[in-house]
Image (cartoon, coloured by chain):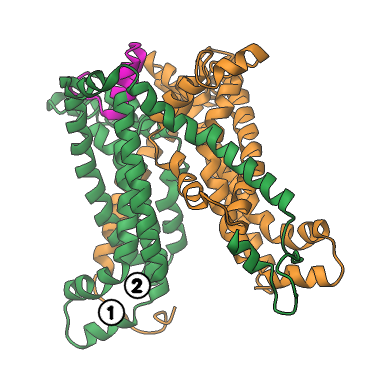
Chain colours: A green, B orange
Amino acid sequence: MPAAAVHSAPQNVPSARVQAATEDSPIVRWSLIAISVSFMALFVLIPLAAIFAEGLRKGWDTYLASFTDSHCLAAVRLTLLVTVIAVPLNLVFGLAASWAIAKFDFRGKSLLVTLIDLPFAVSPVVSGFIYMLVFGIQGWFGSWLADHGIQVMFAVPGIVLATIFVTFPFVAREVIPLMQEQGSEEEQAAITLGASGWQTFFRITLPNVKWAVLYGVILSNARAMGEFGAVSVVSGHIRGRTNTLPLHVEVLYNEYNFVAAFAVASLLALLALVTLGLKTLVESKLHSH
Amino acid sequence: MTSISRPRVLPGFSLTLGYTVLYLSLIVLVPLAALFIKAAGLGWSEFWQAATSPRVLASYRLTFGTALAAAVINSIFGFIVAWTLVRYQFPGRKLLDAIVDLPFALPTAVSGIALTAVYSQNGWLGQYLEPLGVKVAFTPLGIIVAMTFIGLPFVVRTVQPALEDLEREAEEAAASLGASRWQTILWVIAPSVVPALLTGFALSLARGIGEYGSVVFISGNMPMRTEITSLLIISKLEQYDYAGAAAVAVMMLLVSFAMLLLINLIQRYAARRYQGVL
C-alpha cells in the first residue's frame, strides 16, 4: 500500500509507520474493503458472471445459434430502429432546451427545468400506460387512428414513443448546467462580429459542450436499447414484429428456453459494459475540461 | 446572470423555447394529463375503491416495504462502498468503482433473469441458502434483492462526491483538539455527509417503488403475496380495466412526485446549511 503510506506521513513525523489522525487502523480499513468487495460481488459481479455462464452452458455452438434465430434478428433490427429514431429526437430537443434555458432569462424557467426531469420520476410501467390512454383503442385518438388505418399501440410508433419518454431528460440534464456555467459571452462576441445564429451555435456553443452532449447520448442510447417496462406495456409482444431485444429475452425466458434467453441477455450485458467503458472515458474528458 | 438587464443579443429564443415547450407537451405533459383525466372520470368513490381494494393495498405494502428495506440496505452498504472507494487504495479499486454503475447500465430484464438465476433454489448462491431455510427467489426477500441491486448506484454516486469534498484539515483539527476517531466521524464527518446520504436513500427508495423489469422475474408475482404495484397495473391492463389501472397509476405518480419534492427539499436544506461553511 504505497499510497496509504504517503498519506500517513506528515513531514514532522519521523516514521512512516505512525498512523495519522485522519487514517483508519488497518483492521478497520481491511474489514471495510472486505465488506465492500463482498457486497459488490454478491449483488453485482456474481449476477453478471451468471449471465455469461448460463448462456454458454451448452457450449459455443448453442450460444451462437441463439443469435441466428429469425426472431432474434428481428428483435435486433427493431431495437436498433427504435434507438436510431428516439435518441436523435431527444438530442435535438436537449440542445434546443439547453439553448433556451442557459442563454436566456424568462419567467417559469425553473418550472420548465423541473418538468423536463419529470419522466425520470414516472415508473416505467406508467410511462407506457399513458400512451395507451392517448393512442390505444379506448384512448383519445384511438378510434380516429383506427379509422385511418394507423396503428400506434402494439406497433413500432408506440414503442418509439415510450422509448422517447424514458430517455427524454438525459441529454438536456447533462447539457443545461454546463451551458449555464459557461455563460453567453463567447456567443455574444461572435454575433456582434457578424456570425449568424447557426454559425455561432455550431462553431462555438456545440464544441464547448460536446462531451456533455456525448455523455447524454451514451446514457440515452443504453436506456433506449435496454428499456423493458415501458416498452413491454405498449409492444403487445408480437414475435418477430414488436419484440425488442429485452422483450425477446423475456419471451425466451418464459418459454424455459434459458440458454437462448441468457445468450441474448449476454449481448445486452456486453452493451452495458461498453456503455460503462465509454461513460468512464467521457467523464474523464468532462472533468479535465 | 448578466443578461437580465441587457437587451437580447443572441437569436433563437422563440424558436428554441417554442420547440422545447411543444415537444415537452406532446411527449410528456399531454399523456400524463390523459392519465389524470382517465382517473378523474371514475368519480371520487369509485376512484378510491379502485385505488384501495385489498389486492391493491397488499401491493402497496409489499412495494413500499421492500423498497424501504432495500433503501436501508443500500444506505448502509452504499456508504461503506463509497467510503472505501474514496479513502482507501487497494488492488481492484478502479474496477470496483467502474462496476458500481452496472445496475444503472444493465437492462432491467437482464438484471432480473440474472438475479433469479443466482438466487433461485438451485442457483449459484440459492443452493447454499436453501439448506439454511432462506428462500430468496419468489419471496419478498427476492424483491428486496432486486431493489437493492437497482438502487445501489444512487447511494454510492451521491455519497461519493460528498466524501471527496470533505476537507482532511477539519478532521486533523478535530483530532489535534483531542477528539477520538469515533468523535471525529460522528461530529465532523457525519454532518456533512448526511444530506447526501439522505438524498441517496430517497433516490434508491423512489427507484425501488417504480421498478418493474428486475423485480418481475424474481418476485413470483402471486396476488396478495408477491405482486408489486407495477405488475398489478399490468394485470389490470391485461383485463382491459384501464380506469382501475389509471387509479393505481395516479397513486404511484403522486408518491413519485412526493419523493421528488422531498429530494429537492433535502438538497435545498443542505445547500442553505452549508452556505456559510463552504
Query: Could you tell me if residue B226 is visible in this image?
Result: no
Residue B273 position, x and y percent, is 69, 66
Task: Please tell me whether residue A253 belongs to the stretch shown in magenta.
Answer: yes
Tell me the number on the disc at residue A103: 2
- Left or right placement of residue A212 versus residue B272 in this view: left
Quarter-wise, where is residue A4 in the image?
A: bottom right
Q: Which residue is rendered at x = 82% and y = 72% of the image?
A: B176
Residue A120 position, x and y percent, is 44, 44
Q: In this view of the protein, which residue sits in the foreground, A206 or A28?
A: A28
Residue B138 position, x and y percent, is 54, 15
Q: In this view of the protein, which residue sits in the foreground, A66 or B67?
A: A66
Q: Which quadrant does the C terminus of chain A fall into?
A: bottom left
Which residue lies most toward the right here? B178
Quarter-wise, where is residue B240 in the image?
A: top left
Identify the residue under disc 1: A187
Reply above or below: A62 against B210. above
Reply above or below: B146 against A196. above
Label 2 SS:
helix
Amino acid at pointer 1: Glu
Amino acid at pointer 2: Lys
Quarter-wise, where is residue A269 in the image?
A: top left
Indicate the chain on which mark 2 is placed.
A
Q: Which residue is rendered at x = 61% and y = 13% of the image?
A: B130
Q: In this view of the protein, which residue sits in the foreground, B11 or A6?
A: A6
The stretch in magenta equals A239-262
Q: In this view of the protein, which residue sits in the foreground, A228 or A176?
A: A228
> Mark 1 packing: few (<14 Cα in 10 Å), some, or many (20+)?
many
Query: Could you tell me if residue B240 is visible in this image?
Result: yes
- Left or right placement of residue B204 versus residue B186 in this view: left
Task: Please tell me whether residue A29 belongs to the stretch shown in magenta.
Answer: no
Q: How many marks?
A: 2
- Left or right placement of residue A118 versus residue B140 in this view: left
